[in-house]
Amino acid sequence: MAGPEKDLQQQIVDDLLTCGICLETFDSKLKKPKSLPSCRHIFCMECLTKHVATEQRRRGQGGWTTFECPTCRKKVNLSPKGVEGLPDDRTVLGLTDKVLNKGAVKLTTKGGEKYRKDGISLQVVDNCPKHPRENLRMFCNRCAMPVCAECVENEHDGHSTSGIKKVAGLSKENLNPLLSEGKWKTEELGGHLKGLQYAEERLQASREAATADVQNLGRTLKSEIDSIVANILGVIEGRYQNQLQILTREKDSASGKLKELSQICSGVEAELKNSTHSRIVEKEQEMGDKLKQVVSEDVPVSQDVLTLGFKASRTELSDLLFGEVTETVERVDRESFTNRILSQVGGNGIILNPGGVTTWEDEVYIVDRGNKQIHVFDYHGNSRRSFSTDVFGNGSEPQDVCVTIFENESRVLVTDKREQGLRIFDKYGTFIDRVGNVCMGPMGLTVSKQNQALIVVDEDTNCVRIGLPCPALGCLGPSANYSHSFNHPFGITTSLKGKIFISDCQNHCIKVLSSQGAHLHTFGSEGGGEGQLRHPLGVHCDDQGRILVADSGNRRVEVFSEEGEFVAHVVTAEDGLGCPVGVALLQERNTLVVTDAITHKLLFLRYS
């Protein structure tokens, strides 16, 4: 797990091992961490020495007396030894040595940033235009501008300040949603352009087909009707040219807009990736305005596809009717041409053999079966946190996850085959309780939306357990087991009406039970056609009662009505799907999340 470990190291360096003035990492020499007794803020000895000297010059003090903390402005008393006499923060010093100094550490460069050998980045900042020897390490909240240490001591004395990195992070948070919408808008416009290209191809093909029909009629009627045939061909050609001119103009316009908007998004993305913190802050308004221009661009939701045809009629020459040129308009949704995948995370060992997935409060929880972890992402796919399910050090086989509320606190429930039951955590990964030896092979789990009953699928005994006792959730049981000719049941979900939907993997179907466990009906059959399934795994019920099914054998996610009628394919192998396992929705954001056991990734897709 090199990726999460490196992220954790970087977070420790940024939050704990970095001086708040120069933003450089502490060491045991000039950058030794010094703790201020009055407020416990920590800065390096070199920066504090410069800060004290600057403040003394400004105040005209002749000896070492007091100075103000650069962050909170509390007064700090100095001993005769000056800054060197301030206490060292030995906890930070020891942590610095442990995290950063594992063997020889050499600085390398990568993409314009400084990196240590272990891949931890060091801060790169701009120089102050007023004080070229100083770096823009802070942000003046009153004046809304990046400043250096000397600026704070002079022009901005007494003003509230924040770290430039923190402010730049807020700027990124403001711009990233707009950037995501801008990227999606370019995808929509790209889909529109593909629709126009498709319309042109169909128009051309239909022209060729209609022309062939007319030519066949002309050969049959021979020379005496050549002039009439030519006239009809002229009509076809004229209509073709008229429609082609319309499509060509629309294509040129759409292509130009796509290029312009793509350049805007690429430019903003490059700025966010490569620019310094101060530049990002300075250009936030400009970049935001550009992205709003992208997001506000109207893109047609469908494409009118005009095709040409010819209806021929045969009769005696004296009564001959040559037919007419027809036009047929087929409306094709833009989504047919638009890439459905918004983003994806994982791969490279970050996620191994992902299992179940669920959503809670704009966060996505997925089971990492290979690494025995739960990963939590935000709705953009950014990593929030991860925690291990192997809480006792004797192994873990996590399968599925769901989140519920108990006594106003979030509870993360994980089915674990090693536990033969559940392990329960809070939303931050702190272990709370276990429910062991209640299932031979626990797989999917859910909490009923109707009566809050805990329901677990037991794959090894081919049954579903309803009302499983769980004191940590206030569920006292008793539970009841139901077996309806299951053959390796896997996923489970419930509707607002209390119906229970279970994927029966080896029977290639979905079985529907009442809230009391009675079998109501079954839908789906083995095959690759619409509404057919091969080894269904995860299932999810949306707010409208539609059932989403991870159809692993057919490499797609299918949608059914609550009664089991086929509705649509949401994503297929043509979109790059390998083997869908878990499926869930960020309902308010119209985003579908799918775990893929082939690519070892979590996919975010547009859902409508």
Image (cartoon, rainbow, N blue to C red):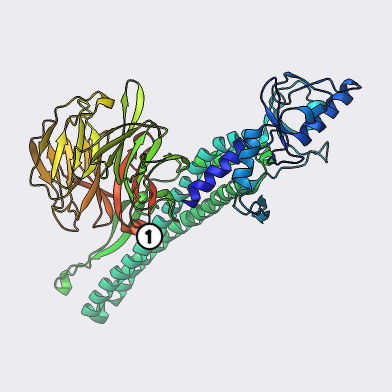
* Residue 287 visible to the viewer: no
- The answer to whether residue 348 is above or below residue 397 is below
- Specify whether residue 578 is in view: yes
Task: Determine the residue positioned at 68% across, 37% down.
Answer: 282
Image coordinates of residue 433 in percent, x first then y, are 31, 31
In the figure, is residue 422 to the left or right of 69?
A: left
Where 380 falls versus 303 (above or below)?
Answer: above
Label 1 residue SS: helix
Q: Amino acid at mark 1?
A: Tyr
User: In the figure, is residue 544 to the left or right of 268?
Assistant: left
Question: Residue 336: horizontal and vertical position, in percent?
Answer: 34, 53
Q: Residue at x 31, y 58 (%)?
A: 573
Closest to the observer: 194 or 543? 543
Query: Between residues 231 and 453, which one lies in front from this camera angle?
Result: 453
Residue 331 relative to residue 145: left or right: left
Location of residue 111 by image quarter: bottom right
- Residue 45 picture location, percent across and down: 76, 34
Q: Tell me the residue that label 1 is attached to.
A: 198
Q: Position of residue 608 (x, y in %)?
A: 33, 41
In the depicted view, which residue is nearer to us: 445 or 325?
445
Residue 270 higher or lower than 318, as above or below: above
Q: How many marks?
A: 1
Instruction: Decide which of 433, 244 is in the foreground and name it.
Output: 433
